Image (cartoon, rainbow, N blue to C red):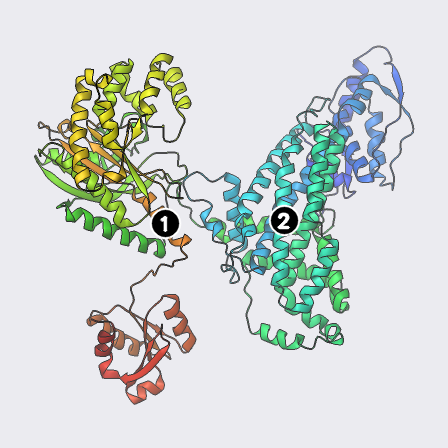
């Protein structure tokens, strides 16, 4: 079937392998395309109708009732034609031919005299829901076009309002949490705005929500498109009205309209001259649909859907769609005028001055000094609009008359029925599909890059962490990023499926390290160590399906103590270290949930869980911080084979949570079921020693004794704990650890007991970054103390002076440029406290200017004393 295009004006229906699209229905409905009946389809109908019955089929005299508007009538008849040509028996060629002739005659109105039709033809005419499908096709075509145009218009608004567009870069965080279409919209926006110098300053909610709102609309439109095409080409004569797909577009359409309306108002506020802004605002208030009219439209459409008035439902939805199109057109108009207001002022200068606005010329000159650099995509769209206005003779009027013509012409340009609209739509598609930004490399999901500001926070955090670790006598260790697969397997319980396997290299099967604990145990065993206190900060890898806050590559900060020590001594020190880390990182309130693996196993034994299911049930219990007990109970019973009674018994235990010493006292009271279990008694005694030591160290207030803490890793044998942040940033667990007395023995002949903690530094970073953002703090990415500013183009002068500073141990950068403000802007942007300025005059006089950026003061000093003076001021 021929697709609609600039030179294609014929739509072929009925041919083998051809299908009817919404675009084709729309083209015929709006009169820009004719229909042609495939000759083989007509032959098939003739053959079918003649062989289906030896006798003449009974006829019914029937009047085809057409919709009131010509566009809907043509859409209705196009769908009827497609259904008639599907090849059913008793469909004659005469009816399709007659309908196609009526469509191709391009009448101002369509009318049919009563016809004699067969029962099969009558069924198609009355029961195929052709009007509903025709309406749906129109909605589909216009909504699909709107999805693309709305993105381009929103990009213009971003520039007109000087909006901060950082949200487009943060949508696809690589963690797999972002919706596909949201990521697609964000990518397209970056393509449209690539190279723009106007964005990045003003925070606007209606801009930051573009990816989500437009992405939801795009998702629903794609769903509507696929379903509508399937329904148009269904062999069934009876359309599925009850499963009306267009209803899914209603809510996203409303959100799109509201968001566009807000940006249009922002654009209005961004128009630079008062007279121009006032004139546009007057037209906007009189002609642009309001949020109230949108709300009323949604209410009407919703009511029709509930009443199952399907044809009226789709008709009114199309009306609402037209309303949103008008809003988007107004957004384009206000954005264009905000960007091109100076040019409008030039053309309308006489009209404004006649009304007393004599300042237009002055403002124009002032604005002309500023070079406006649009994005590579938006500049093309803006130029298309300018070409359209010039082609319409937009320069022939003055003042408000010109403005009204601009508003009308831009509105028509963004009307899908306009003859130039297809060219605009194709240009937008070409931009987002072929722009060089689309071909930029993309990060794998679950990974991230860290810019200079983030790296500054990370380096500061790592410095604090290393200082705490070294305070406790630990030495640093590094191990390979990958291990032999046999080293890692069997150590992580059900999570072993998340180990990243590598391809076979030379007969060795290797995997990326899952954590730092197993490599540490392998190192201790390999080297025959019997005691070792070490820390390691390195990346680990998980073959995970990334979700919010989870990554495939991330840092862990581990501290472990291996060897024979006083009972519970290392356990106490590890928990103490964790509290020091979290306190000194200054992230806010937190708690450390603590339990004992032997107590957990005793609980499962008491409840009647078979020993072979201990580990898998622990994995279920470990999810209680994310799921309700009812969900966990269902998993334990239905998937893992526990009885309901056993699961309920577990439920009574895992709800126990409270102050360590108080809950411990309760569990040791006479009658406690734990006292009849040897393993549980050992655990309670261990915890008694630990809690008293933590109390003496004044950190027990951060610890919560929690019997629901399970930690699913197989290698834990004693105390287990997990730290959770209690602030506003939802990041889950931020640290965890425990005792693992048997792990090292798996790799050697000696059992070396050990205990350790791992800090989830990525989540800590997320908290620190959010805190900095909430407090409006900025991070200085460099430690540069001095900017050597050479006013001119003499690199050798810069090389000589800056080298003296470097040799003296000062942190310095240099800039060679003739413009003084370039140097000052560089110093301020990088927050460099001192400048050494050397121009031609300073060079001739043998001096330099030493400028204090914060105090905005400068003084002249001899060139020979630069290093000495700077060291004095920097207390070096």
Q: Name the residue under label 2.
A: 149
Q: Residue furthest right?
A: 113
The mark found on residue 667 in the picture is none
Cβ atoms under marks 2 and 1 closer than 8 Å: no
Is 773 left, or right, of 191 in this rendering? Answer: left
Residue nearest the observer in this picture, 586 or 54: 586
Q: Residue 193: horizontal and vertical position, in percent?
A: 53, 56
Is 712 left, or right, of 778 in this rendering? Answer: left
- Distance, label 2 to label 1, CA atoms, is 32 Å
Q: In this view, does 438 lie above or below 35?
A: below
Q: Can residue 510 be seen in this view?
A: no
Residue nearest the observer in this picture, 6 or 589: 589
Q: Quadrant of the N terminus?
A: top right
Q: Residue 816: horizontal and vertical position, in percent?
A: 36, 75
Give the structural element (helix, strand or loop) at label 2.
helix
Q: Which residue lies furthest to the top in this view?
A: 54
The answer to which image quadrant residue 96 occupies is top right
The answer to which image quadrant residue 231 occupies is top right
* Mark 2 or 1, nearer chain start: 2
Q: Is residue 645 above or below residue 718?
A: above
Which residue is found at the position 33% from the left and 60% from the top? 781
Residue nearest the observer in this picture, 141 or 562: 562
Q: In this view, does 274 lie above or below 709?
A: below
Which residue is found at the position 26% from the left and 19% from the top? 603
Q: How crowded is mark 1: few (under 14 residues within 10 Å), some or many (20 or more)?
A: few
Give the structural element (helix, strand or loop) at label 1.
loop
Q: Mark 1 points at which residue?
A: 449
């Amino acid at each position: 079937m021929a697709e609609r295009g600039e030179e294609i004006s014929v739509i072929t229906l009925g041919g083998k392998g051809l299908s009817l699209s919404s675009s084709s229905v729309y083209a015929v409905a709006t009169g820009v395309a004719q229909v042609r009946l495939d000759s083989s389809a007509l032959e098939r109908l003739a053959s079918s109708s003649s062989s289906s019955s030896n006798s003449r089929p009974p006829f019914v005299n029937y009047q085809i009732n057409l919709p009131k508007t010509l566009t809907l009538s043509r859409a209705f008849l196009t769908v009827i034609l497609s259904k008639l040509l599907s090849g059913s028996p008793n469909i004659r060629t005469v009816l399709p031919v007659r309908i196609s002739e009526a469509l191709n005659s391009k009448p101002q109105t369509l009318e049919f005299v009563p016809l004699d039709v067969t029962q099969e033809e009558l069924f198609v005419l009355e029961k195929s829901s052709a009007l509903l499908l025709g309406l749906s096709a129109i909605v589909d075509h216009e909504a699909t076009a709107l999805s693309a145009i709305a993105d381009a218009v929103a990009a213009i608004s971003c520039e007109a309002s000087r909006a901060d567009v950082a949200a487009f870069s943060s949508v696809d965080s690589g963690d797999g949490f972002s919706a596909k279409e949201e990521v697609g919209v964000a990518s397209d926006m970056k393509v449209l705005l690539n190279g723009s110098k106007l964005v990045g300053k003003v925070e606007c909610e209606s801009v930051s929500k573009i990816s989500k709102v437009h992405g939801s609309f795009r998702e629903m439109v794609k769903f509507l498109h696929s379903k509508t095409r399937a329904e148009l080409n269904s062999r069934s004569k009876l359309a599925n009205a009850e499963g009306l797909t267009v209803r899914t577009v209603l809510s996203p359409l409303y959100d799109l309209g509201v968001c566009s309306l807000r940006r249009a108002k922002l654009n209005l506020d961004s128009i630079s001259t008062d007279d121009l802004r006032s004139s546009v605002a007057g037209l906007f208030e009189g002609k642009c649909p309001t949020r109230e009219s949108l709300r009323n439209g949604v209410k009407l459409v919703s009511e029709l859907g509930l009443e199952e008035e399907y044809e009226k439902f789709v008709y009114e939805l199309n009306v609402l769609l037209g309303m949103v199109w008008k809003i988007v057109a107004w957004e384009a108009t206000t954005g264009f005028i905000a960007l091109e207001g100076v040019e409008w002022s030039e053309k309308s200068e006489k009209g404004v001055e006649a009304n007393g606005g004599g300042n237009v010329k002055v403002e124009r000159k002032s604005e002309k000094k500023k070079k406006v650099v649009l994005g590579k995509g938006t500049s093309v769209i803006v130029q298309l609009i300018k070409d359209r206005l010039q082609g319409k003779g937009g320069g022939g009027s003055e003042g408000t008359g010109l403005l009204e013509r601009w508003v009308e012409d831009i509105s028509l340009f963004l009307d899908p029925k306009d003859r130039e609209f297809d060219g605009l739509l194709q240009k937008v598609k070409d931009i987002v599909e072929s722009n060089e930004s689309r071909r930029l490399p993309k990060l794998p999901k679950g990974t991230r890059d860290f810019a200079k500001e983030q790296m500054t926070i990370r380096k500061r955090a790592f410095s604090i962490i290393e200082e705490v670790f070294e305070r406790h006598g630990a030495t640093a260790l590094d191990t390979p990023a990958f291990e032999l697969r046999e080293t890692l397997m069997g150590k992580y319980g059900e999570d072993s499926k998340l180990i990243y396997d590598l391809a076979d290299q030379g007969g060795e099967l290797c995997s990326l390290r899952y954590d730092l604990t197993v490599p540490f145990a392998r190192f201790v065993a390999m080297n025959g160590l019997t005691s070792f206190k070490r820390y390691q900060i390195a990346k680990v890898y998980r073959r995970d399906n990334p979700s919010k806050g989870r990554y495939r590559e991330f840092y862990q900060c581990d501290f472990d103590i291996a060897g024979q020590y006083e009972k519970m001594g290392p356990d106490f020190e590890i928990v103490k270290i964790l509290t020091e880390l979290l306190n000194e990182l200054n992230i806010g309130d937190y708690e450390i949930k603590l339990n004992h693996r032997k107590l957990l196993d005793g609980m499962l034994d008491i409840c009647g869980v078979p020993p072979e299911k201990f580990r898998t049930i622990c994995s279920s219990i470990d999810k209680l911080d994310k799921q309700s007990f009812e969900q966990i109970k269902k998993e334990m019973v239905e998937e893992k084979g526990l009885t309901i009674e056993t699961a309920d018994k577990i439920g009574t235990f895992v709800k126990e949570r409270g102050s360590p010493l108080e809950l411990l006292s309760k569990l040791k009271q006479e009658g406690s079921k734990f006292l009849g279990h040897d393993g549980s008694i050992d655990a309670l005694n261990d915890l008694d020693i630990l809690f008293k030591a933590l109390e003496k160290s004044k950190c027990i207030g951060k610890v919560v004794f929690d019997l629901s803490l399970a930690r699913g890793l197989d290698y834990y044998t004693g105390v287990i704990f997990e730290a959770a942040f209690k602030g506003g940033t939802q990041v889950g667990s931020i640290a965890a650890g425990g005792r693992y007395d048997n792990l090292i023995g798996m790799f050697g002949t000696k059992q070396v007991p050990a205990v350790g903690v791992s800090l989830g530094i990525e989540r800590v970073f997320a908290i620190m970054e959010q805190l900095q953002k909430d407090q409006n703090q900025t991070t200085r990415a460099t430690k540069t103390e001095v900017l050597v500013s050479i006013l001119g183009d003499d690199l050798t002068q810069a090389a000589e002076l800056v080298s003296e500073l470097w040799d003296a141990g000062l942190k310095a950068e240099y800039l060679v440029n003739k413009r003084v403000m370039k140097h000052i802007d560089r110093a301020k942007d990088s927050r460099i406290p001192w400048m050494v300025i050397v121009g031609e005059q300073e060079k001739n006089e043998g001096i330099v200017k030493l400028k204090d950026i914060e105090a905005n003061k400068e003084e002249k000093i001899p060139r020979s004393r630069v290093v000495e003076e700077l060291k004095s001021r920097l207390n070096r």
